[in-house]
Amino acid sequence: MSIRSIASRVTASVTSRTAATAPAITAPPAGLKKGDSGPKVKQLQDGLVKLGYLTKAQAATGPGTFGSLTEAAVKKFQGDQKLPTTGFYGEQTAAALKKALAKPTTPTTPTQPGKFTKPAVISAPSPNSDSRNGANIDAIVLHHTGTNNGKGDMAWMRDPASKVSAHYMLDRDGKIYQLVGDDKRAWHAGKGELNGVPTDVNGRSIGIEIVNDGSGKTAFTDAQYKALTQLVGYLKQEYKVPAGNIVGHKDVAVPKGRKDDPAANFDWAKLRKGIGT
């Protein structure tokens, strides 16, 4: 037998033993809430990390402690699963987490360098921006414009008197307009928090406006989902944005309930599948 064959068998054997001994990440029993601590909370955090709702770094700030970051991640998971966003890890959330963790792991190739390239954009500069003051981009915030009139929405965001803007606007036909450069701070989120922590959301995020009236009855178009997947996939890759920091305006606006976008019929699962999270 050749040395190469022996080496291959040894490698295969080690890989097999490692896979066999690696503990599977499973959902803990229901009944966890903010303030709890212990191995069951750590088990919950491991599951949220695997699904992209927490980063390993975020989980490491309070391993085994159900703090604000874990609560925010639970709420985001609940929202994506169409469950009440209470932040309490109850029976329904536990069942949904168990089901999600049982699915085969999504391949990571969509977020590997070179997979996503920046889609074609149409330049439409807005004066409504300022400096990020050195803040790094680590979040992406999605909005609906509140109308189905892309031309009017763009005019409003380019009007100095409106004092609002976003980095990108996606029209109904899937065309992407860039109003503010990524390096600038656009004015799209207002007073807010990220993962339960008060912060200047505008200073650290990319804002994307999707042309939709926000009624929950007007469908987001296939062209918009296609363009949004390419754009968010590129931005996530380019700025190493954690999956848990790809959020809606309603997730970051304070006080809670101040905003409801993107609308309830926006398909988060479709977007997350497209970008590989």
Image: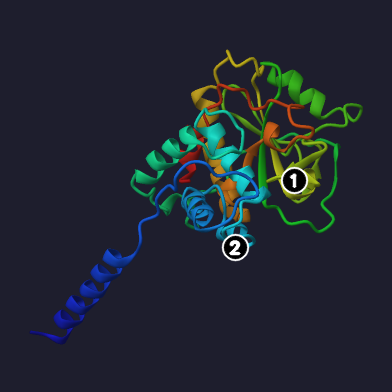
At x 59%, y 46%, the residue is 244
Counting other residues with Cα less than 10 Å from the Cα at mark 1, is it few (<14), some (14-19), or many (20 or more)? Answer: some
Counting other residues with Cα less than 10 Å from the Cα at mark 2, is it few (<14), some (14-19), or many (20 or more)? Answer: few
141 vs 265, left or right, is: right
Decide which of tag 1 and tag 2 comes sooner along the chain.
2
> Disc 1 marks which amino acid?
Gly
* Residue wearing tag 1: 181
Q: Can you say whether 13 is above or below 260 in the image? A: below
* Residue wearing tag 2: 60
Residue 216: x %, y % from top left: 60, 16
Q: Hey, which quadrant is residue 163 in on the image?
A: top right
At x 77%, y 27%, the residue is 258
The number of discs equals: 2
Residue 6: x %, y % from top left: 15, 82
Residue 188: x %, y % from top left: 78, 35
Q: Which mark is residue 20?
A: none
Q: Can you say whether 195 is above or below 2 in the image? A: above
Residue 119: x %, y % from top left: 57, 41
At x 44%, y 45%, the residue is 29
In the foreground, 226 or 216: 216
